[in-house]
Image (cartoon, rainbow, N blue to C red):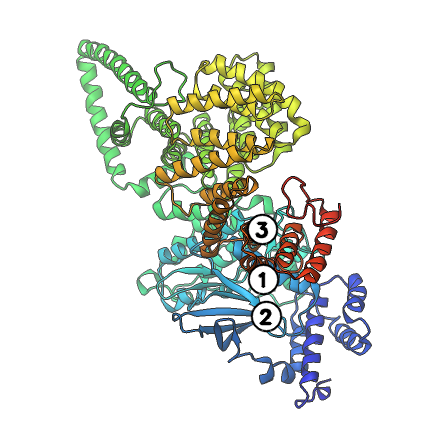
Amino acid sequence: MADLVDPGRPEEVERWYRIDALFSAALELPEEARSGWLREQCGHDREALADVQALLQAAAEPSFLDTTARESLASVLGAALERPAANRSGTVLGPYRLVQRIGRGGMADVYLAEREDGRFDQRVAIKVQRRGLDTDDLLARFRSERQILSDLSHPNIARLLDGGATDDGLPYLVMEYVDGLPITEFCWKQRLSLRERLLLFDQVARAVQAAHAGLTVHRDIKPTNVLVTPDGQVKLLDFGIAKILDPTSGSGVPRTRTGLKLLTPEYASPELVTGAPITTASDIYQLGLLLFEILTARRPFEDVESGSALEQAIVESRPDRPSSIVRPGGAAGYPANESGQIARRLHGDLDIIVLTALRKEPERRYPSAFEMAEDIRRHLTGHPIWAHRDSRTYRVRKLLKRNPWIAPGLVAANVAMALFIGTLIRHGRQMEAERNTARIEAEKTREAQNLLIGLFRSADPFAPVSESRIDMRVSDVMDLGIRRARTELANRPELQMLMLGTIGDVFMGLGDSERALELRREVFDTAREWYGEDAPQTAVAHRELIEPTLRWILREPVLADSAVMLAIRALNDVRRAFGQVHVETARAEIAAATAMSYSASYPAGEVIVRHALAMLDALGARAPVERAEGQMVLTQILITSGPDRWPEAVDVGREAVSAASAAFGDNHPWTWSMRIRLAGVLSDPVEADSLRRAAIDAFEAQLGDWHDVTLQAYLAEALALTRRGDHGHAADVYRLLIDRRLARGDDPGDGWLMTLTRSYADAARTTGRYGEAEAAYRTVLDFERASTASSPAYTASVQARRAWTLIDLDRPAEALSEALSARRLAGDSHKNPLLECVLGRAFRANGRSSDADSVLAIAADLIAETGHLVRDYHPCWGVTPD
């Protein structure tokens, strides 16, 4: 077959590139799907079809996991595939010149490139689609990697900088160049200590968690995809076979096709091998493999031959404990002073962490990469890890290891106790007097505790007490309370937990969700330390973590799914501690439903909150606070489920307002929060406006102009005005929100501020305030172009709206330039008729009627297909067929 490749005929080399690409892609398909797919791809090229089928027949014997067939093809086509014509070094792509090829994979080549335009010095890595890989599926996967990288922004994930297409139409990605070594090689060459290796791995786990929070499964975590720079920073690379978890995200990223096996055999999870559904648990397994190799310099099944034996081992065999295979002075490259102790130090917690991640059953692994990283951190700080079976002996051993002074202290305490008992026997009457004194002191302590807690509560505007107010200066008092609780109450966990939890609630009421979350985590850790994993105190502390976490994700919406996982785990803990039917269980179910509503899991959230409300009724529990909160959550879920649920939302909302009024008082912020939610679904606009305006006045009086709740109330008013068509007043409210956020010190580039600015621009444009709208669109575009996490589809949409506004400002040349830029950015596969409509109008405004008619015909087809035309303000209204 190699005889057919003539070095002097570039077209022959090109042809074999295509055959190589088709063969590689066909190997990943189920056998029953290959024939039809190949006929579709080859078309009338029967010779190419015959060549690929011959290669597939030759490769039929080895197991899927065996690389023999692929290596055989490489030897057959090696001369052609490695010819200088295939190397793009020296080519200029945009402002970059390709210096040399530094990597080659199944889909693409990676080049080191330098900036060519002289503006500044910059080295980047450019990933170019391989010639011949122009099938729809593989091009879609390349675009998928581009979309995934554009949505991810994390210091330990290699950044996407730019993208485009070569002169011959192949897509490429411009990425951050990482000058580093694979993480395993870095550990061994630098002879890192065990602690240093674990800290490196912590960076990897947190990068993977960031990808999971962005609904992305990497699927190919291995040493060569985890590089470490000389200064010790980890960079996670190559999302080429990653999977998007949310197929309804609207990103345009394709779902993984059922039947394709995309994997590196030595680092495959059982699900990847068997074709089971892929979730974040697959990445947890690969993190376990990576940690195993970092610690031992071996892979779990390194001695197993490739092919079916390796496949069987991955699915069925239990890996050895890392501590059982590491040897002093072995290839793992630990420092000389640690080498003889490594097996002992791996035994216990680290064995458990690795083997938990390597469970065959996905549901028995760590629920998230964050929890795996957290166990690494807890091991390094001497705390009990979550994956270890809980026992009093284990907790005591950890406590003694963290505090070696405790053991001699206990001996001294026992001696002192013996002396004290002797004194009690000799002085019985004196003991009675001391007992009375102790009882009096305890009563004084309780009174002081109530007084201090009452002081904190008085500064919480959401506390159910009549004297609540926000104007009291309490920050110094709270900081002092935190310090005293941590020191003076260190041996009184119940009182310490109550004090820290109360201060956390006050911070939450004042809008400082970060401090509140910090204190609630400390309460949870204290409960586990003193009472154990299964204790009721620990379950309650776990449940009380949910609300501050939800408040925090208002600023970081990407973490909503992590909050759901936390809520479900807390609910399971509460059910174990209190039973299936209990007021505490109802509280936990309401909190879990709230978390689900934040992540748009409305059906599941509705089922759970209705169950909680029914449980409260069955218990006959008064529980007015819990009932009001449950009805509040149900109302919000019904509102967001669509207009057909709004009549029911009105009924439940009125009940929630009554319950909140009974629980907190008629003029309490929670009661007003319920009223403003109710206003959003009322059919009577006069009643809705009156209720919304009264709520805003109450929030400004009680919480202040800059409080998050006040600003959210104004946002609700702006949305209501927009729905009613009063865009002029809506624009004024959006402008007020932007000015207040800037005045209170919010980052001008904050994502929420940019969302408000976009809404302000839309409203201003609709009411003919074109100059204001154009300036606002420009602000949003400047932010998007500077952001490493910008979405091309979103940026193109904003560009189109700015172009539309420029047409109205009678600036046709600028409008056409902006519209063409938006069209290029969106790509050929977009389904947004707005882009085509604006481009058509821009052509017409520049006197190019023929081009305008052609583009507007495309727009009409898209409108018919998607139904996106909104007659009141769409740019196609009046210029395309009705």
Q: Residues within 10 Å of mark 1 (few under 14, many from 20)?
A: many
- Gap between marks 2 and 1, in whole Å? 9 Å
Viewer-closest of 792 and 861: 861
Position of 625 relative to 752 (above/below): above
Foreground mark, 3 or 2, reads 3
Between disc 2 and disc 1, whose residue precedes?
A: 2
Between disc 1 and disc 3, whose residue precedes?
A: 1
Query: Identity of the amino acid at label 1?
Result: Gly
Residue at disc 1, secondary structure: loop
Query: Identity of the amino acid at label 3?
Result: Trp
- Gap between marks 1 and 3, in whole Å? 36 Å
List x then y, in percent, for residue 768. Answer: 54, 42
Position of 181 relative to 631 (above/below): below
Q: Which residue is mark 1?
A: 240
Q: Which residue is mark 2?
A: 108
Residue at disc 3, secondary structure: helix
Using the rendered image of the protein, determine whether residue 430 is visible from the camera's viewpoint.
yes
Between disc 3 and disc 2, whose residue precedes?
A: 2
Q: Which residue is mark 3?
A: 804
